[in-house]
Image: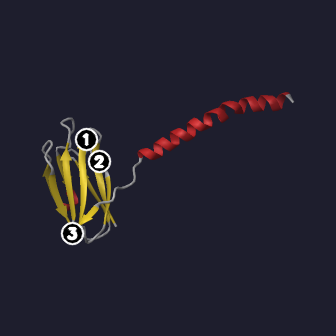
């Protein structure tokens, strides 16, 4: 009987910690935001991107192949190295002046992932083409 009681007491901290562990796993999963879908207007996929102290938001966007994409990027902070948007695969190097919306347009021809970043390649995001 004593062994059974000791076993129950040993397991007690694990049982008490289970809700906290589940909660931390849940919050970690919520930090990984799913890809944002664009709004389509007149056949153009419109994506609003903002540069904040957290980086590019959203950092993951899904678009459809064969349809034009228009990124509207606004840098909202001076405390960032993301003063330029670089999409090396498309040859895009677009300055991002503070508080000034900038438009970048392209038409992805095939599915895959297009990466975008700051000029220093410290802050990045991706466009997933389906």
Q: Residue at x 87, y 30 (%)?
A: 1
The outermost residue toward the front is: 41
Residue 36 locus on image (x, y percent) = 34, 56
The residue sitting at 39% across, 53% down in the picture is 34
| Label 2 residue SS | strand
Q: Which colour scheme is used?
A: secondary structure
Q: Residues within 10 Å of mark 3 (few under 14, many from 20)?
A: few
Residue at image point 13% right, 46% down: 100
Residue 30 visible in the snapshot: yes
Q: Earlier in the sequence, mark 2 or mark 3?
A: 3
The disc placed on residue 57 is 2
Q: Name the residue beneath numbered marker 3.
A: 42
Q: In this view, does 24 lie to the left or right of 45?
A: right
Which quadrant of the figure contains the C terminus? bottom left
Total numbered badges shown on the rendered structure: 3
The image shows residue 66, relative to residue 22, as above or below, that is: below
Q: Can residue 87 be seen in this view?
A: no
> Residue 78 occupies which quadrant of the picture?
top left
- Local packing at callout 1 (Cα closer than 10 Å; few below 14, some 14-19, many 20+) is some
Contact (Cβ within 8 Å) of mark 2 with mark 3: no
Residue 109 coordinates in the image, percent (x, y): 25, 71
Asked whether disc 2 touches disc 1, contact meaning CB atoms under 8 Å apart, the reply is yes
State the image coordinates of residue 41 (x, y, percent, origin top left): 23, 65
State whether residue 100 is above or below residue 21. below
* Marks 2 and 1, the one that precedes in the sequence: 1
Cα separation between marks 1 and 3: 29 Å
Residue 110 image point, x, y percent? 29, 70
Look at mark 1 in the image and give the residue it sits on: 52
Q: Residue at x 80, y 29 (%)?
A: 5
Q: What element carries label 1?
A: strand
């Amino acid at each position: 009987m004593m062994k059974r009681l000791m076993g129950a007491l040993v397991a007690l901290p694990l049982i008490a910690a289970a809700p906290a562990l589940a909660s931390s796993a849940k919050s970690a999963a919520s930090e990984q935001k799913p890809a944002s879908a664009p709004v389509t207007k007149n056949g153009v996929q419109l994506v609003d991107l903002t540069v904040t102290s957290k980086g590019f938001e959203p950092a993951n966007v899904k678009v459809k192949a064969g349809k034009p994409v228009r990124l509207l990027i606004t840098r909202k902070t001076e405390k960032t190295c993301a003063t330029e948007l670089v999409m090396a695969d498309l040859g895009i190097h677009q300055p991002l002046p503070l508080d000034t919306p900038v438009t970048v347009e392209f038409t992805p021809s095939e599915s895959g992932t297009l990466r975008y970043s700051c000029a220093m390649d410290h802050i990045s995001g991706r466009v997933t083409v389906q």
